[in-house]
Image: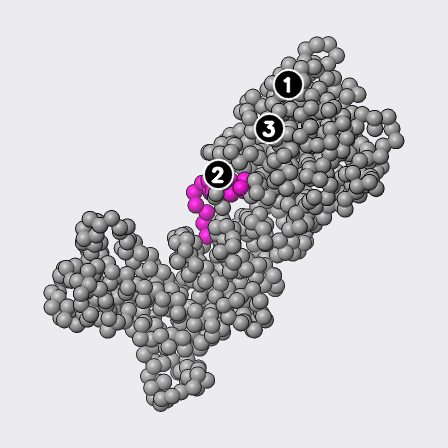
Amino acid sequence: MGSNSSRIGDLPKNEYLKKLSGTESVSENDPFWNQLLSFSFPAPTSSTELKLLEEATISVCRSLVENNPRTGNLGALIKVFLSRTKELKLSAECQNHIFIWQTHNALFIICCLLKVFISEMSEEELQLHFIYEEKSPGSYSSDSEDLLEELLCCLMQLITDIPLLDITYEISVEAISTMVVFLSCQLFHKEVLRQSISHKYLMRGPCLPYTSKLVKTLLYNFIRQEKPPPPGAHVFSQQSDGGGLLYGLASGVATGLWTVFTLGGVGSKAATPPELSSPLANQSLLLLLVLANLTDAPDAPNPYRQAIISFKNTQDSSPFPSSIPHTFQINFNSLYTALCEQQTSDQATLLLYTLLHQNSNIRTYMLARTDMENLVLPILEILYHVEERNSHHVYMALIILLILTEDDGFNRSIHEVILKNITWYSERVLTEISLGSLLILVVIRTIQYNMTRTRDKYLHTNCLAALANMSAQFRSLHQYAAQRIISYTCRHLRRYVYVLDKLCFPHSHCSTLQHCFSTLSDNGEELLSLTCSHILRSYASSLFSLLSKKHNKVLEQATQSLRGSLSSNDVPLPDYAQDLNVIEEVIRMMLEIINSCLTNSLHHNPNLVYALLYKRDLFEQFRTHPSFQDIMQNIDLVITFFSSRLLQAGAELSVERVLEIIKQGIVALPKDRLKKFPELKFKYVEEEQPEEFFIPYVWSLVYNSAVGLYWNPQDIQLFTMDSD
């Protein structure tokens, strides 16, 4: 078919690709390269199109893998590209469309070839393809060169130095994509790579000086969210016959061009998916996250992470410490705006987490903002739609909230921000609510979802930690937020009694426990042989008093008894003891949160007192529970004090009158009667070896979100395809 290829399936027969991958060496000065690089087709974007391209060119790539050690054609192609990039900046300034177009095509071919090479061979074998030198006279210089390192440095120069114009947009995206491909060897290893050739190139040698400039450029690409130029504006105008982008060259090169081919028909798909307005910003962010999460070299820390954790605001005139390398300055206001606007994507949320957790300059700046709702609301919306998000995205959003709630100023200020008509919150119409109360509602909803669906211990622990950090600064809680705090606690109090019943009384025949409790000995051992299935509320305190005798022993023996009685049946054994421990942890934390609010900001929260009094009967049952007795003292005191005042006021009180009595009582309640507890404060700390979580996560984002890159899912080793 040769140069008349019109379908993607004809690519393996294309005469230029056959010559490139064949057994004949092609000098870097051969006119063949102008012919090879003078092609055009709409860039594939969908996974279907990319898969078609991969399948059509795989035979060409494998042929080159086989023949390149003898021909050195891959090295010649790279040298052609390297020589062209030296004039790329001048070509952009002079609007040399043809030169930029051909240089882009060279990089596109290199990227496609490199992707296959990396997926099919070890790094050591890959390096051999790039250091091969043809010994015949006149073919190559006698100097030994590492073309792989030279190519990587050239890409970094291209990304950082070439001005972003309509005619350079695509080659900028392609350069970033090629760097991502260069690092993609991680995809084909189950274990996290801690030493590799890519690490060596990026962390020392001629690439190292570009560190801060590259990180800054990638961040600015994310900030600017530059949209691609309209179709036909990249280089030349589109042909009127609609036959794709055929470049109307008036030179002799035109006779050697490939015939334009399309993937699935012209206009079958937009150049970018509708939800991805800026391929350059998306690709830049993915590369930035990959670089930031490279493991440290044995003898040096990751310089890209160093750059990310130390950059400062352009308005900060203080000198950089001499001990911190790879520093730069960037406009924090622009970065903050971009982060607020882009939180719908996993990768933007992960960037926000990285900056908040690791860059103290960014964290200080964000916490000082007076418009924190612009950042917090998108994070809350992620958590609110937990059913539609993957677990990693939800986890990152939650950790961001936990980091923010470590700051007392944040915890105070969010109750001063009043929001109107939160349309995405559908459980209840919220015409007016503080940001703090909304945060409480969403976090409690997330805990509830987790407890009933995913049952992830880390998720609910971090949710409760965020609420605990806020609790001392609760201010003017919305009545619905106060109600949800109390009702969620009550839900677990009831659940606790139910599970304890099932654990201690698996076989039930009695309808009341009055007789049972009256016959129990003081040591509580006979509790294990009882056959009641229903614990009446009035006897819960009696049960708790038994637990207080030998709490752990009673539960342990009850569990053993339950296993012995049920193990003979072919039914799954309910793990009531484990359920009980989890529920007890949640109850304890919720009681501490309520207690913290009552002792530190009772006068600001009459709605919480009202909700507590409404459910006082259930709370009173737990005053004797051995695990909660200490924390129940203040809650019990508040319930008793305000119940007495309501009783004195008479029956059939309106809601307004009850709230009025509560507000009067708050003033009258001596503060010294409430026992002081240590302040609830939790700080987020990454677990040991965080790369075991973050590197697979980042590469899953690359795999699912990168523009114009496709990997065969069967080749992926780092993560499973059904993981989030």
Q: What residue did someone put label 3 on?
A: 116
Viewer-nearest residue: 123 or 54: 54
User: Does residue 240 appear to the left or right of 79 in the view shown?
Assistant: right
Which quadrant of the structure image shows residue 501? bottom left
Q: Which mark is residue 16?
A: none
Secondary structure under the numbered disc 1 in the rendered image: helix
Instruction: Give x and y (percent) for residue 407.
Output: 50, 60
Q: How many discs mark residues in the rendered view?
A: 3
Q: Is residue 73 magenta?
A: no
**Mark 2 or 3, nearer chain start:** 3
Q: Marks 2 and 3, how far apart in space?
A: 19 Å
Which quadrant of the structure image shows residue 213? top right
Q: Which residues are magenta?
A: 684-700
Amino acid type at image mark 2: Phe
User: Does residue 448 appear to the left or right of 619 in the view shown?
Assistant: right
Query: Is 658 located above or below residue 347 in the figure?
Result: below
Q: Marks 3 and 1, how far apart in space?
A: 14 Å
Query: Is 124 located above or below residue 185 in the figure?
Result: above
Amino acid type at image mark 1: Asn
Q: Marks 2 and 1, how far apart in space?
A: 31 Å
Amino acid type at image mark 3: Val
Instruction: Give x and y (percent) for residue 380.
Output: 53, 60
Q: Residue at x 57, y 47 (%)?
A: 347
Q: Which mark is residue 719?
A: 2
Res. 490 in view: yes
Which quadrant of the structure image shows residue 515? bottom left
**Mark 3 or 1, nearer chain start:** 1
Cβ–Cβ below 8 Å for labels 3 and 1? no
Q: Which mark is residue 68?
A: 1
Q: Residues within 10 Å of mark 2 (few under 14, many from 20)?
A: some
